[in-house]
Amino acid sequence: MIWERGIPVLLSGAFYTVLCVFSIVTGLMYLRKNNTVNPLELPKAMAKRIDDPLYMKKVSVFFGWLTFFVGLVQGMTAYSLLLGSSPWCYWLALGFTVFSMLSAGSKLIMTFNLFPIMKEAAYIAVFVVLMLSGTRGLYF
């Protein structure tokens, strides 16, 4: 049953569930509007060209599909944490968490911002939960 997972795993799954919903909705908004992208998501090289409407339309469509796809993977990760019971579920959750840590960390290299720092802290917490032997025991 889901409650046997323990509070840390349930919180990690809830975190990814919220991210999943947020990413899918944001991706659909980017695709629908075709002109707005969260400036916190843009690298500095792209942020310099933010005034060009044709360029921003292309960037918005690209980030819309990318964000939507990431939301789907976050949903699979949430499922893996909350209900998964096979080693594949563990490796999916661990792999995507490491990917997310690297992604958020790369944004910290470009600029110092509180948003990526908070995301990085949350991903590190999920990583620690996944490394606990009790968590690994749920899957293996």
Image (cartoon, rainbow, N blue to C red):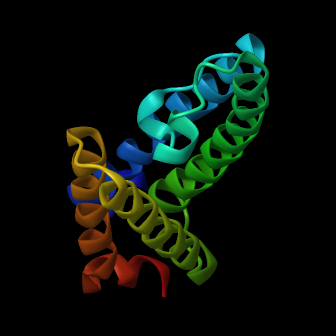
Asked if one can make out residue 6 in the rendered structure from this viewpoint, the answer is no
Which residue is at a point 50% across and 29% down the rendered structure image? 22
Q: Is residue 129 left or right of residue 28?
A: left
Position of the N terminus, as image quadrant, is bottom left
Q: Position of residue 133 (x, y in %)?
A: 27, 86
Between residues 88 and 112, which one lies in front from this camera angle? 112
Which residue is at a point 63% across and 78% down the rendered structure image? 88
Which residue is at a point 51% across and 40% down the rendered structure image? 42
Q: Is residue 127 left or right of residue 71?
A: left
Q: Position of residue 31 (x, y in %)?
A: 76, 22
Q: Position of residue 67 (x, y in %)?
A: 64, 40
Residue 136, placed above or below residue 28:
below
Q: Position of residue 15 (x, y in %)?
A: 36, 44
Residue 93, placed above or below residue 16:
below
Quarter holding residue 77? bottom right
Asked if one can make out residue 45 in the rendered structure from this viewpoint, the answer is yes
In the orientation shown, which residue stands out farthest toward the top? Answer: 33
- Tally the marks: 0
Q: Is residue 73 left or right of residue 82?
A: right
Q: Is residue 139 left or right of residue 7?
A: right
Between residues 25 and 46, which one lies in front from this camera angle? 46
Residue 72, placed above or below residue 22:
below
Between residues 138 and 42, which one lies in front from this camera angle? 42
Quarter holding residue 120? bottom left
